Structure formats: structure tokens, C-alpha cells
């Protein structure tokens, strides 16, 4: 790596502009943005026109550029750029979680083959340094779980609904205006973005590559004012929680879904676009990492950190992927959940464990029960179609509390 890093950047949206500002103000790193490839020829730009190009090849074929920083939101186009850059020996820093989650194993093999480095701290939880923490600090620790709030937009929307009584549409529109949301906000509110981040973390926690399509992921888009009222009466907040959970020495599970968070839990009170990661390990016990999960500057800061790491030839080593006896992904487990549905037919096909409690109201019906993750995965598309709200219940809150609140809400 030359002393002065010469960067070719793809994309100049919220994160690209954030990185530009961050680099301008950062004194310790000698890095220059030499060229920026963008798509939209009609947009007015805040930087001199000669810095911009509309041709990817102007960066990819420029031998003087050592690092490609990829910050576009089209995952397939990003995959093309990243693979070409790595093949031509350029180091790559990317924030594209969807692209990484869909192609991680192959990209890791490619970077090992080419010797170039692929870094992506900005792809998970914005400015929270969790990837290198799992990779390096928790190198040999026995990780029990990694979980938390991984999507800033969903958290921002839930906060606006809860604190300001905004409608879902108004809250989503604000998240979009602030540059937190993806161009396709279904990725945020449907839980897919958190799921992509979860799969990236699974590779660094346990050395395993999981296809996001195999993970149960249910977002916040089916939640209603009734669910939030229910949470309030329970003394909890609803958060979209992504979870990697070790089940035994040789098995672990992954899931993304809304969860009731008790007021004694540190995730309660993590609001707006903030993210939080809770890491539980055998020896260090529980640690929390809380910070801004979206936005130009926090994400730009994570890119800066990767650029800086490149100056001392840093690469993820993926040591855990080489270890024997890696745990196996498992979905045959029981979860405690709350469901809100309108008609009996809506819960057809779901088999609840014994002890399920049903509370019927005029508009909504509630059930508090255990259900298998496998069953939820199999029925996910049906559940979405039937507009069923599902929230994971907190083991610290007893079943009788859920039943009491449901009865109060339906006036029984
Ligand atoms: N749309 C993402 C979020 C951006 O809201 O968390 C940061 O990854």
C-alpha cells in the first residue's frame, strides 16, 4: 500500500458524502478520493465535475487507484464492481450488506486467491465496530450469543410511532428523508436488512456462511397501534431484534423478529437510528455496543476505519472458518411468541405448544404461546399475507402478564 491511499469511489449518496466530509476532517490518514463513479448525470453535485465519472472502467482500469470504496445501493451492480476490483488486485471497502450476505463465502475465497483485502465494517450497524471485534477480540472466546438492534430505520420508525404517535407512513417517510432507509424500504421494515447483517456477523462469530433466505425474518411492517399499546401496558418496548444464539456446543440458530423488551433490559431505551449489539460470551460475560447505526457520518466513520486498517495491511483472517467442529445452523427450536390476528382462519397451520393462551376481542385476537421456528419459517409468506403480527415474548415476563394485558385490551 502506498503512503497516500488513492481511492476510487462508487456512489455519492448519503454515505459517500459522509465519507468525503469525514476524510476532509481526519488528520491521521493520508487518503485522497481520486475519482467518484455515479449513475445520475442530471444531479447537481457539491464537488468539482472533473472528479465524477459515469464509467466504472475509469476507476477499475486505473492502475494508480489502490482502493475501491463501494457505496452504491444496487447489490447486483455492487457485486460486479467488487469482484472486478478484487480480481484486478485493488483492495475493496464496501458497506453493501445485501451484496455481502448473498456472496460472502465466494468473496472471501476470491480475496484469498487475489491477495487483495476486502473490508466491510460499515456494512453492519453503522459506526459500531462489531465485525473486527468479533473477528479479533472474540477470536478464541466461547460466544453464547450476539444479538440486538441492527436496523436504524426500523428503530427510528418504532420510536416515532411510540413517542410522537406518528402514523407508520409518516415515520417511514421521515426515515427516508434523513437518509437512513434503503431505496427499497421493504429491506428495512421487512427485517431483510437486519437479516443480511446477521448473516455477516454469523461468519465472524462462528465461521459459518448462512444464506439469508434460510433465516426466519419478520419485520415491523405488520405491527399496529394495538401491538404498541400492548407493549406499553406490559411495561415494555417493541424492538426489531436480530439474534445469533448458540443452542449447544455444536448447534446455533439465527432469527430476526420484533421482540418485547422489558424496561430492565439495556436494549430498552435504545431509540431513534441507534443500534445496539449485545455479545454474551463464557468469560467476558455480557457486553453491549451502542451507537448510531445509520447516517452518513457514522457509516463514513466505519469506512474511514477500514481505510486506515488498509494502511497497515489489515485483512480479516476468517480463522473461525478453518476451525474443526464449527456449530451447525439449526431451526428445530421452540420460541415463545405473541400473535395478533383477526380471524381464526388466519392462524390455520400454526401448531402451538401446550399452554397456549387465546384471548378474543372484537377486532383483534391474541395468542401467547410457544411455536417452533421451523413452523414459522414454513408459514412465513402465509403469515405476511394474513397480516399477522408476531412478537417474540421476553422470558423475563411471565405468561400471566401477557394474558392479563390481552384481557385488558379486549375488555374481557
Ligand atoms: N437502512 C439501513 C438502516 C442503513 O436503517 O439500518 C444502515 O445499514
Image (cartoon, rainbow, N blue to C red):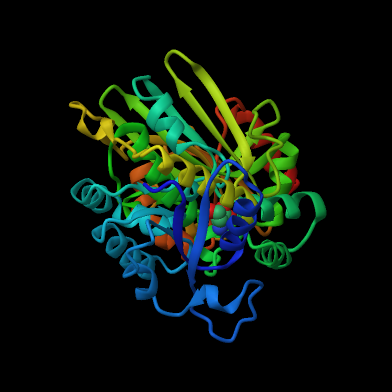
Instruction: Specify the farthest residue to the bottom.
Output: 42
Total marks drawn? 0
Percent of width and height locating residue 346: 48, 60
- Picture quadrant of ligand 1: bottom right
Residue positioned 42% across, 15% down in the render: 282
Q: Is residue 388 depicted above or below 53 in this figure?
A: above
- Residue 70, image x and y in percent? 44, 61
Relative placement, left or right, of 101 versus 53 is left
Of residue 149 and residue 122, the one placed in the foreground of this image is: 122
Quadrant in the picture for residue 270 = top right
User: In the rendering, at what x and y percent does residue 339 appear?
Assistant: 55, 48
Which quadrant is the C terminus positioned in? Answer: top right
Q: Is residue 279 above or below residue 119?
A: above
Q: Is residue 164 left or right of residue 45?
A: right
Residue at (31, 70) in percent of width and height: 61
Name the residue rendered at 55%, 27% in the picture: 395
In the image, 378: left or right of 54? left
In this rendering, position of residue 121 left or right of residue 341: left
Q: Is residue 362 visible?
A: yes
Q: Is residue 362 above or below residue 105?
A: below
Q: Farthest residue in the right direction?
A: 164
Tell me if residue 220 can be seen: no
Residue 336, image x, y percentages:
49, 36
Q: Nearer the viewer, residue 384 or 248?
A: 248
In depth, the one of 387 and 359 nearer the eye is 387
User: Which residue is at a point 40% across and 65% down the rendered structure image?
Assistant: 75
Amino acid at each position: 500500500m502506498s503512503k497516500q491511499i488513492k481511492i476510487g469511489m462508487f456512489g455519492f449518496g448519503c454515505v459517500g458524502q459522509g465519507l468525503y466530509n469525514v476524510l476532509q476532517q481526519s488528520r491521521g490518514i493520508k487518503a485522497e478520493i481520486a475519482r467518484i463513479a455515479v449513475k445520475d448525470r442530471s444531479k447537481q453535485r457539491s464537488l468539482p465535475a472533473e472528479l465524477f465519472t459515469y464509467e466504472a472502467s475509469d476507476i477499475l482500469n486505473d492502475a494508480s487507484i489502490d482502493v475501491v470504496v463501494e457505496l452504491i445501493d444496487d447489490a447486483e451492480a455492487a457485486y460486479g464492481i467488487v469482484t472486478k476490483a478484487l480480481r484486478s488486485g485493488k483492495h475493496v471497502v464496501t458497506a453493501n450488506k445485501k451484496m455481502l450476505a448473498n456472496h460472502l463465502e465466494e468473496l472471501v475465497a476470491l480475496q484469498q486467491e487475489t491477495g487483495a483485502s476486502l473490508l466491510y465494517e460499515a456494512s453492519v450497524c453503522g459506526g459500531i465496530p462489531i465485525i473486527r471485534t468479533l473477528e479479533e477480540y472474540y477470536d478464541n472466546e466461547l460466544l453464547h450469543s450476539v444479538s440486538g438492534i441492527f436496523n436504524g430505520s426500523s428503530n427510528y420508525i418504532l420510536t416515532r410511532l411510540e413517542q410522537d404517535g406518528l402514523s407508520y407512513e409518516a415515520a417511514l417517510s421521515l426515515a427516508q428523508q434523513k437518509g437512513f432507509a434503503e431505496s427499497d424500504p421493504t429491506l428495512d421494515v421487512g427485517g431483510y436488512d437486519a437479516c443480511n447483517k446477521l448473516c455477516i456477523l454469523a461468519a465472524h462469530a462462528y465461521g459459518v456462511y448462512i444464506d439469508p433466505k434460510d433465516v426466519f425474518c419478520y419485520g415491523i411492517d405488520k405491527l399496529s397501534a394495538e401491538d404498541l399499546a400492548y407493549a406499553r401496558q406490559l411495561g415494555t418496548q417493541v424492538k426489531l431484534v436480530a439474534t445469533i444464539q448458540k443452542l449447544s456446543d455444536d448447534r446455533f440458530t439465527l432469527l430476526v423478529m420484533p421482540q418485547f423488551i422489558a424496561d430492565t433490559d439495556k436494549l430498552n431505551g435504545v431509540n431513534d437510528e441507534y443500534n445496539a449489539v449485545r455479545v454474551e460470551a463464557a468469560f467476558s460475560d455480557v457486553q453491549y455496543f451502542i451507537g448510531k447505526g445509520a447516517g452518513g457520518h457514522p457509516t463514513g466513520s466505519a469506512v474511514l476505519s477500514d481505510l486506515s486498517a488498509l494502511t497497515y495491511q489489515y485483512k480479516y483472517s476468517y480463522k473461525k472458518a478453518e476451525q474443526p467442529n464449527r456449530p451447525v445452523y439449526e431451526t428445530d427450536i421452540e420460541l415463545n411468541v405473541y400473535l395478533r390476528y383477526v380471524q381464526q382462519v388466519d392462524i390455520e397451520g400454526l401448531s402451538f405448544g401446550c399452554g397456549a393462551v387465546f384471548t378474543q376481542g372484537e377486532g383483534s385476537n391474541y395468542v401467547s404461546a410457544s411455536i417452533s421456528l421451523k413452523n414459522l419459517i414454513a408459514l412465513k409468506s402465509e403469515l405476511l399475507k394474513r397480516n399477522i403480527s408476531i412478537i417474540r415474548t421476553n422470558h423475563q415476563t411471565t405468561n400471566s402478564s401477557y394474558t392479563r394485558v390481552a384481557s385488558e385490551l379486549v375488555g374481557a
